[in-house]
Image: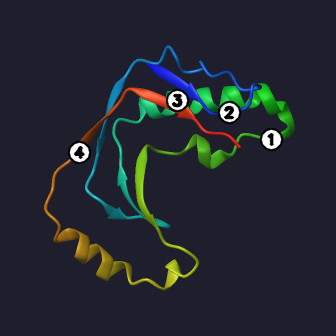
Amino acid sequence: MEARSTSSPLRPPNAAADVAPFDLPLSRPDIGTVAIESKGYPWAPHRALGDRVWQATHAVVGDRWPRIPSAVASYPHLSHAYAGAEGHLADRGVLKVALSDLLGELVTLPVTALTLVAV
């Protein structure tokens, strides 16, 4: 898989160069806790990439930053829109009904390149 980097020289741009391309099927949009999102399947390729990102990060920052537990339990997904500061005021039931009226099936995205974006 092609690996591109916009990161500093401290981060290896080829850390994921040997990850084989894979398909990421996404579910219909649904209301999440903080966003409208589509969940991705399967979890294994996502987990492998997450582990590599952590290894590359740890190589730079060492033990100064612990691994965030929620990152270990993360799941592949696409966020369509975030709720914002007043998201807790939204009527999730109304949003779920509105999304249930949309037609559509799973969408499969081919993952053929990775870009590490760092500031």
The Cα atoms of the two marked residues, 2 and 1, are separated by 18 Å
What residue does disc 1 label?
Answer: 65
Which residue sits at x=68%, y=26%? 55
**Residue at image mark 4:** 107
Looking at the rendered structure, the secondary structure element under dot 4 is strand
Disc 1 element: loop
Q: Of the two numbered discs 4 and 2 on the same chain, state the one appearing first in sequence.
A: 2
Q: CA distance from mark 4 to mark 1?
A: 36 Å
Q: Nearer the viewer, mark 4 or mark 2?
A: 2
Distance from the alpha carbon under mark 2 to that under mark 3: 17 Å
Label located before the other in sequence (1 or 3): 3
Q: How many residues crowd around disc 1 within 10 Å: few (fewer than 14), some, or many (20 or more)? A: few
Which residue is label 3 attached to? 49
Residue closest to the far left: 103
Inspect the image, locate mark 2, and give the three-letter code of the amino acid beneath it: Ser
Residue 65 in the image, given as x and y percentages of width and height: 80, 41
69 relative to 3 in the view: left or right: right
Q: Does 110 sit left or right of 6 as displayed?
A: left
Circle 1/circle 3 CB separation < 8 Å = no
- For disc 2, the marked residue is 7
